[in-house]
Image (tube, rainbow, N blue to C red):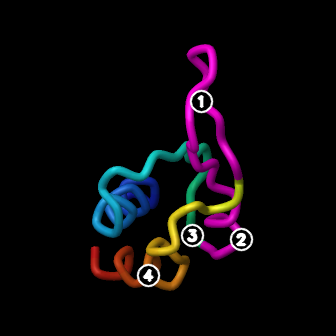
């Protein structure tokens, strides 16, 4: 299964309404820390941050879910 599909499925499992932008494959914690998390919208543009605003989504939990796939 493609890595992008795995990360998306893992994130949806952990928090189905989390919004994010992933431009590259996420296979390491460093990659995970580079996800752009959507925190809002201003003038039709997404407001993003590299700081994960969802305490229930951690690299450990995401990796665990990805490994199940």
The residues tagged by marks 2 and 1 sit, at their Cα atoms, a distance apart of: 23 Å
Tell which of 27 and 44 is nearer to you. Answer: 44
Question: Badge 4 local density, few (<14 within 10 Å), some, or many (20+)?
Answer: some
Q: Secondary structure at mark 1?
A: strand
- Label 1 close to label 4 by CB (< 8 Å): no
Q: Which is closer to the viewer, label 1 or label 3?
A: 1
Q: Which is closer to the viewer, label 2 or label 1?
A: 1
Q: Which mark is residue 46?
A: 1
29 over 18 or under it: above or below: below
Q: Which mark is residue 63?
A: none
Q: Residue furthest top?
A: 43
Q: Position of residue 61 (x, y in %)?
A: 44, 81
Q: Secondary structure at mark 3?
A: loop
Q: Which is closer to the viewer, label 1 or label 4?
A: 1
The residues tagged by marks 3 and 4 sit, at their Cα atoms, a distance apart of: 13 Å
State which tag comes first along the sequence, 3 or 4.
3
Q: What span is in magenta?
A: 28-49
Q: Secondary structure at mark 4?
A: helix
The residues tagged by marks 2 and 3 sit, at their Cα atoms, a distance apart of: 8 Å
Q: Secondary structure at mark 2?
A: helix
Residue located at (35% from left, 62% from top)? 15
């Amino acid at each position: 299964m493609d890595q992008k599909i795995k990360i998306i499925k893992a994130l949806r499992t952990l928090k189905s309404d989390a919004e994010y932008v992933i431009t590259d494959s996420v296979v390491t914690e460093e990659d995970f820390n580079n996800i752009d998390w959507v925190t809002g919208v201003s003038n039709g543009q997404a407001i993003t941050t590299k700081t994960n605003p969802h305490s229930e989504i951690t690299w450990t939990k995401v990796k665990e879910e990805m490994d199940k796939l």
